[in-house]
Amino acid sequence: MGPSEINPPDMKNMTVDNITENTILINSLCPDRRLVFLLERLVTHLHDFARETRLSTEEWMAALDFLVLVGQISTDVRHEFILLSDILGLSLLVDAIDHPKPPNCTDGTVLGPFHTHEAKIMPSGNSISQDTAGQPCLVLCTIKDVYGNPIPGVKIDIWETDSTGHYDVQHSDRTGPDGRAVMYSDERGSFWFKAIRPVSYPIPHDGPVGKLLKLLHRHPWRPAHMHFMFEKPGWDHLITALYIPPDEYMTSDAVFGVKDSLIVPMGKTSKEEEEKYGVQEGIALLVHDFVLVTEEATRNLRDQKALEAMSTLFPGKKVTLLNHSPVPELD
């Protein structure tokens, strides 16, 4: 697309004082109003960051080289950019903004870099782990709405590490998915499975994100947890996890994922559970009731919070919601 087709403004003689407004001006030629707003805020904050920190060329190049390394180490099964987003707190922030939770429903948390789409569909009662070295664990769950009604037919994606603290995709000799499964809730909103007790583990720290953590004097460890993701049309998509105490990393999770409402102590299976579920008495037992909220309720709450945020950030400006994303009328 040539200059004659877009009629750009004069972009000469740019300085510290006028580069931001002119970058925003030329970006505003885009017909997508939401994209224009996103770039306006991104350019504003990036340029302000450079001015406020007096960013040097050496530091800027180091940052660009760092991002190149993040891209180079990423693969289909190792998402270093997700990891970077996680350790910067951005992943949790975006989830909290996009999926606000009304009272009395299950909180969301980070997806993490090791979710895959290759887990096998299993009926309740199956074992999701082939790790014989792990401590056996029985998991009994229900899915309900905020009024206590069961929700049948919910797709549940489950994944956890092995007893060494590694996900299946971290093993070069793996032959297929392990420590993960897809299940569906029954008419009572229930699902259950056999697994191994989750263990603490470090996020991958042999790459650029790990080096950044070391520079920041931060550890790479996550407390023991098990991931869950819930999907059903009409219900808000939920990514969450259950964290198992006691754990020395519970208050310093490297990716900021822990919430009090998601900390669930484990018990021990009883004789009755041994007979009912075909497991040994006295193994680890994880019991939890998940509560989902409808898409409509989440959408309404997200719209409300978006308008409240815009009125604070841009007082007096008219704000339009495009596909439930705010776009203020900027000068």
Image (cartoon, helix red, strand yellow):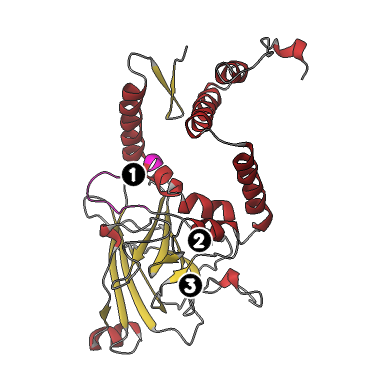
- The answer to the question of whether label 2 and label 1 lie on touching residues, with beta carbons closer than 8 A, is no
Near-viewer residue (165 or 264)? 165
Q: Which residue is at 39% across, 19% downward? A: 319
Precedes in sequence: disc 3 or disc 2:
3
Q: First in sequence: mark 2 or mark 1?
A: 2
Residue drawn at (30%, 64%) of the image? 142
Residue holding disc 1: 294
Q: Residues within 10 Å of mark 1 (few under 14, many from 20)?
A: some
The answer to whether residue 208 is above or below residue 8 is: below
Residue occupied by mark 2 = 214
Residue 55 in which image quadrant: top right
Majority secondary structure in the magenta region: loop
Cα separation between marks 1 and 3: 30 Å
Q: Is residue 115 left or right of residue 302?
A: right
Tag 3: residue type?
Answer: Thr
Three-letter residue code for mark 2: Lys
Q: In the displayed structure, would residue 244 be above or below residue 14?
A: below
> Which residues lie in the magenta part?
97-108
Q: CA distance from mark 3 to mark 2?
A: 23 Å
Query: Which secondary structure, mark 1?
Result: loop
In depth, the one of 119 and 56 nearer the eye is 56
